[in-house]
Image: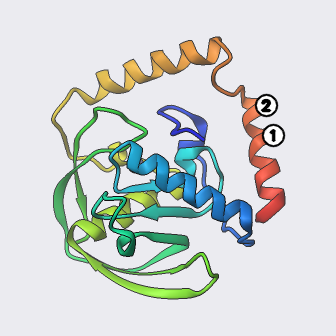
Amino acid sequence: MRVVKYPHPMLTYQSKPLRKIDQTIRDVVAEMFDLMYANNGVGLAANQVDLPYQLVVINPTGQREEKDQEYVFINPTLLKLKGVEEGEEGCLSYPGLRLIVPRAKEVKFQAVNLKGELNTYYWKGFEARIIQHETDHLFGKCFYQRATASTTDLDQALAQMTERYNKDLAAGLEPTPEQFADNVQKWENERC
Ligand code: ZN
């Protein structure tokens, strides 16, 4: 498992609801937490590890020891957004990029956990920002599309990432459109 970087096609893919939670999914979740901590993140969406499922992992503290702060959200749905607040965000799929993004201050949402239970959550502030950022990923939307300001040159940063990606693609390190479609089909057939 690896974190895919812009402009990998999975980052603009609209993931399907996950219908089957099995041992593979539990293993995927554990691996996603490992990757998130290794990269000093506070959240990671399945799209970012090349999986077409509506699944995110979050730990607002970013600390592996803070187990009670670990959340697994399957098929999250934002139900109510309240207020707007600008804040700085980064994203593991856009290394080095920091952007100012407006987000709702408070959010009410529902999600299924790893046990298959549907719960309702009320999050605000930084936590609310994280769930909005991660849910966006599941619908193929990335933070730069919502950004109002950038501390770096956004166009230049995206152009550099595209150039690097195209080199990797030419070297066979990234999937061709056919390989990408096959991969999506395989995962969706198994659990969507
Ligand atoms: Zn992100």
In the displayed structure, 77 sits above or below 164; it is: below
Q: Is residue 68 left or right of residue 57?
A: left
**To which quarter of the image does residue 94 belong?**
top left
Instruction: Give the structural element (helix, strand or loop) at label 2.
Output: helix
The image position of residue 35, as x and y in percent, is 47, 46
The color scheme shown is rainbow
Q: What's the residue at 21%, 47% (across, down)?
A: 148
The image position of residue 143, as x and y in percent, is 35, 48
Q: What's the residue at 63%, 25% (across, down)?
A: 174
Instruction: Give the structural element (helix, strand or loop) at label 1.
Output: helix
Q: What's the residue at 81%, 40% (across, down)?
A: 182
Q: Is residue 39 left or right of residue 101?
A: right
What residue did someone put label 2 on? 178
Q: Amino acid at mark 1?
A: Asp
- Total label count? 2
Q: Nearer the viewer, residue 26 or 85?
A: 26
Q: Within 8 Å of ligand 1, the CB of disc 2?
A: no
Instruction: State which quarter of the image contains the N terminus.
Output: top right
**Contact, CB < 8 Å: mark 2 with mark 1?**
yes
Q: Nearer the viewer, residue 68 or 91?
A: 68
Specify few, some or many for label 1: CA neighbours under 10 Å numbering under 14, 14-19, or 20 or more.
few
**Residue 137 visible within the image:** no
**Residue 63 visible within the image:** yes
The image position of residue 159, as x and y in percent, is 39, 20
What residue did someone put label 1 on? 182
Q: Amino acid at mark 2?
A: Glu
**To which quarter of the image does residue 63 belong?**
bottom left
CA gap between label 2 and label 1 equals 6 Å
In the displayed structure, 156 sits above or below 138; it is: above
Q: Nearer the viewer, residue 147 or 38?
A: 38
Specify few, some or many for label 2: CA neighbours under 10 Å numbering under 14, 14-19, or 20 or more.
few
